[in-house]
Amino acid sequence: MPQDEAGTGAGVSRRKFIAATGAVGAAGLAGCQSESSGDDTTETTTSGNNNQNTQTTTQSGSSEPEMLTAEGSSTVYPIANTGSSYWNSNPPNSDGEYWGSNDESTVPGWEDLGSPDMRLADYFASLYGFEPTGQQATPPFMTSIGLSHSGTGCKSVWDGLVDIGNSSGPITAELGWSESQRDQRVVDHVVGRDGQPVVVSSDVYDAGVTELTGEEVRKIYQNEITNWSEVGGHDQEIYVIGRAEGSGTDTSFRLNMLGSADAPMPGVNTRFGQNQQVAQAVQQNEGAIAYMALAFTGPQVQPVAINFEGTVYKPDKDAEHTIFDSDYPLNRDLHQYTKITDDTPNGTDMREAAFINMFLTTFGQTVFVEGNNYIPLPTKDIESEKAKLPDQA
């Protein structure tokens, strides 16, 4: 199969990643590159539906699926990590709050799933041939989500370091691939959308800058507008915040706002690696402007309305045009990439399919996507994303 110019010889194959039992912290296995050491662990696989249920076999003869690992974008992280937390807890169908139904509450989308008589991870894993455990905090396989950047997530999945690479920017832009290279190397699973907002510090918002044009935003980031008085605000120098180069948020902003992933942004005063850091910087600095993910906005990090060629997109779900609309120019897909290998010629093994499929349900879209302030996929897009997964057992 095609190889990246940098090669993958130094990386550890995800098919040889031997997972320990028990829950792991949010970033516990991100970037892990060491193979099994001295525990007499060997690898076996069981196939199904032209794909692999990747398993490990211990010296005692017991067999269990490997842990599913993912890392990448801080934008996709809230979706993936919340899903991982639910999965690893494997709550019973009588829970009602996190999974299932009882006299007091029912999780969204429960009836759409047919009200299954199984624990959460047991149910979604069983659709792809895994044996249910029937035990709390003991899913058929564990999941671990690491926090880094979109570019790191894309490279890590391509290098075989993780099963899933989370990215808020297209892998073509993150790794400089052509669309043909992408299609030969990975499968792009879109699990939600982000109406990427432009935010300002509370002092700027309170001074009357609640709307900007797309052209004004462009000029601010290209150092052609440097004072808030030039766009109807008070006389104050603009403190311009950007995301780290290589982050999907930065890549998407340049593509959508400036027309190219490589477009220069000489107006940027400082950059931060994660959305959380951007939000904190906007709160702590007067005169600030930034671009970030919807999930990290709030009263001290105010999204402004953006006027694109006469259409004003407002940070209000009840407005005629909103930053939550699919036609909002800064709207972007949230990706989970899986790698095409000899073992998985269609690019997604059964563990990956079971986990990703959970997000492509009314339950997953409501709880993990919309619940983190992102935009659920329309039904037709969910159907097209499901078609990328291997057949269910």
Image: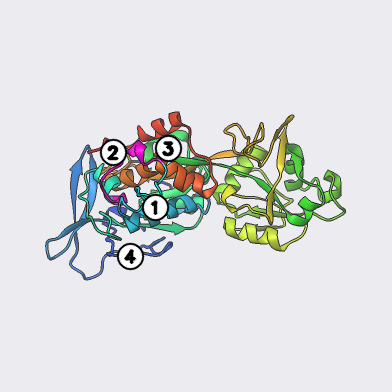
Residue where numbered disc 1 is placed: 98
The x and y percentages for residue 22 are 30, 65
The x and y percentages for residue 78 are 49, 53
Query: Which type of secondary structure does the marked residue at label 2 adopt?
Result: loop
Query: How much space separates mark 1 and mark 2, taking CA atoms?
Result: 35 Å
* Nearer-N-terminus badge (1/4): 4
Amino acid identity at mark 3: Gln
Mark 4 and mark 3 in contact? Answer it, CB < 8 Å. no
The x and y percentages for residue 136 are 28, 60
Mark 1, mark 4: which one is toward the viewer? 1
Q: Quadrant of residue 287?
A: bottom right
Q: Is residue 110 magenta?
A: yes
Between 76 and 365, the residue placed more toward the observer is 365
Q: Which mark is residue 36?
A: none
Amino acid identity at mark 4: Ser
- Whether 21 is drawn above or below 202: the answer is below
The x and y percentages for residue 228 are 82, 50
How packed is label 4: few (under 14 Cα within 10 Å), some, or many (20 or more)?
A: few
Query: How much space separates mark 2 and mark 3, taking CA atoms?
Result: 15 Å
* Nearer-N-terminus badge (1/2): 1
Q: Which residues are magenta?
A: 109-121
Residue where numbered disc 3 is placed: 181
Q: Which mark is residue 34?
A: 4
Mark 4, mark 3: which one is toward the viewer? 4
